[in-house]
Amino acid sequence: MTSDRSAEIRVSEIFGPTIQGEGVLIGLPTVFVRTGGCDYRCSWCDSLHAVDSRYRDEWRAMSAEEVWREITRLSGGKSVMVSLSGGNPAIQPLGELIARGHSEGYRFALETQGSVARAWFADLDVLVLSPKPPSSSMETDWQAFDACLRMSEGRPQTVLKIVIFDEADYAYARATAERYPHLPVYLQPGNHTPPPADDDDATIDIDGVMERMRWLVAKITEDRWFEARVLPQLHVLLWGNKRGV
């Protein structure tokens, strides 16, 4: 019997449990499944090992059951939040994995830029939509983004998370929040020194990140944008850009 390669998940790494470092689930113990491959190439991407095709030989093609076994091994069989990230995890066939985990009491969060809509979004527990601002050098397809919202059908907890580097990014975030006033919005100061994919120990400009965060706090308070939440990348503050933490 031949295997169904269309059902294989391209996996860059599976690690944890550690804490979720950003967004609505910040600080929560989590196992991470980072998939390989992305339909975007952001100028400041900090996960090139899961994006750039030159690293595809490092990605492992795994069945949902194989991924599930690794999750349960890492978690010791105790239910935990599972974060599906990338790259863009929406381009992978993750519906079977989500169903398998739910049957055992696990919960699933997924973060995507909102460029690819999947029917199984409605089965997630948390959907983080992170459209990319001008500093990324990418353009947002709002029709595709709206399709992602329709697929979720309001069932998972759905939030916006937007990375901010400069005034143009901030204006983009304001406009996006106005477009989707029903979605909670999380703002994240950009990581100023994304490392090469093969350099786990690259020095992070923590002072630059914190200066950007202070600027963001001042902006939202001066503008009376009291609905926005500003959070750092906690994992960057703790471990820099090391992989697997």
Image: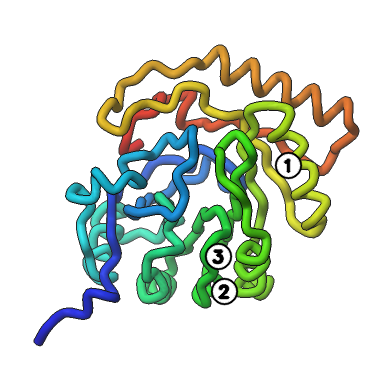
Quadrant (top left, top right, bottom left, bottom right) of the N terminus: bottom left
Which is closer to the viewer, label 3 or label 2? 2
- Residue reaching furthest left? 1
From the top left corner, tell me how far across and down residue 90 is, in percent. 46, 63
- Residue located 44% across and 18% down the image: 204
Q: Amino acid at mark 2?
A: Ala
Marks 1 and 3, how far apart at CA: 24 Å
Name which quarter of the figure residue 37 lies in: bottom left
Q: Secondary structure at mark 3?
A: loop
Q: How far is mark 3 from mark 2, CA to CA?
A: 8 Å
Q: Position of residue 224 (x, y in %)?
A: 90, 33
Q: Nearer the viewer, residue 32 or 60?
A: 60
In the displayed structure, 18 sits above or below 204; it is below
Displayed quadrant of residue 93: bottom left
**Label 3 Cα crowd, 10 Å radius (few <14 / some 14-19 / many 20+):** some
* Residue under label 2: 122
Q: Which mark is residue 151?
A: none
Query: Which one is earlier in the sequence, the residue at label 2 or at label 1?
Result: 2
Q: Label 2: how many residues lie within 10 Å, few (<14), some (14-19) or many (20+)?
A: many
Q: Which residue in the rendered view is the most extreme toward the bottom?
A: 1
What is the secondary structure assignment of the residue under circle 2? helix
**Residue at image point 37% right, 65% down:** 92
Q: Residue beneath label 1, please?
A: 173
